[in-house]
Image (cartoon, grey):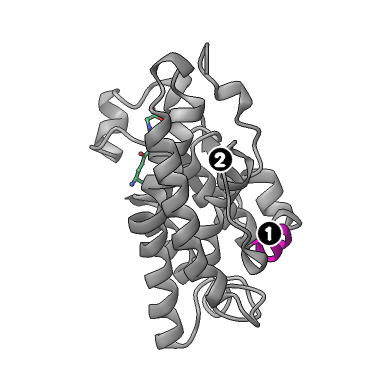
Amino acid sequence: MLKVWGRKTSVNVQKVMWAVGELGLAHQRFDYGGEFGKTDTPEYIQLNPNRLVPTIDDNGFVLWESSAIVRHLAQRYGRGTLSPADEQTFAKADAWMDWALSTLYGDIISTCFIQLVRTPASDRNTDAVEAAAKRAGEKLAILNRQLTGRNFILGDQITMADIAVGVLMYRYFNLAIPRPPLANVEVWYKQLTQRPAYEAHVMIDFKPMMVAGA
Ligand SMILES: N[C@@H](CCC(=O)N[C@@H](CS)C(=O)NCC(=O)O)C(=O)O
């Protein structure tokens, strides 16, 4: 059975778990990281030398890096669904997955989320939050154009691209940051929130994660 190590409040674990949910895979998830710790144990370091979550063991195949895990699960269990069957569409899905990490993650998670949720207001860099929110809105305009006439990033069907980008959207839309109007992104996000696997694994209230004074 598929094993997943990682606390459910981690956005990178949520990405993997959303894919697991969409694919309907039997699995066991173990609370590691954050308040659960255990990522510094010799057993875990054997699985993931980065001491980070998530990590999976798919019937003996161990893998870390959340986007690589989603690609692996999509290719192994979701060919023609989460993993586009067409080679070029697959390449485009891959590009959007990299885009999520290289273009959006830093501003939405590393800056806005960390500053607004994990940093006391007294230590907060509000200029950095403002600049990151502005950049994220500008980058999301690219996604907004891509979604014109499409239900999902690459067409009528959800793919691994929607998972990598969409997992960031719950935080983007629920943090107290300025957002430009992006009609297509908003419709797409609303559709994601209606998917049971998104609701179960991504729409996890992050208020309990707020540090004192945040
Ligand atoms: N690029 C890695 C990043 C993994 C990562 O930074 N994980 C964070 C949680 S989102 C972590 O393990 N933090 C330490 C902890 O939770 O103890 C991935 O996508 O899997």
SS for tag 1? helix
Marks 1 and 2, how far apart in space? 21 Å
Residue under numbered circle 2: 177
Residue contact between numbered discs 1 and 2, judged by CB atoms under 8 Å: no
x then y, percent, for residue 172: 56, 46
Q: Does residue 85 appear anywhere in the picture?
A: yes
Tell me which segment is drawn in magenta. 186-191
- Compared to 214, does 45 lie above or below? below
Residue type, mark 2 in image = Ile
Q: Mark 1 points at which residue?
A: 192
Horizontal side of 156 relative to 58 (left or right) equals: right
Marks 1 and 2, the one that precedes in the sequence: 2
Q: Which sits in the foreground, 60 or 110?
A: 110
- Dot 2 crowding, Cα within 10 Å, few <14, some 14–19, many 20+: some
Residue 210 magenta-highlighted: no
User: Helix, strand, or loop for circle 2?
Assistant: loop
Name the quadrant containing residue 162.
Answer: bottom right
Q: Where is residue 49 in the image (x, y as percent from the top left)?
A: 23, 37
Q: Nearer the viewer, residue 125 or 196?
A: 125
> Residue 162 versus residue 72: which sits nearer the camera?
162
The residue under the point 34% across, 27% down is 39
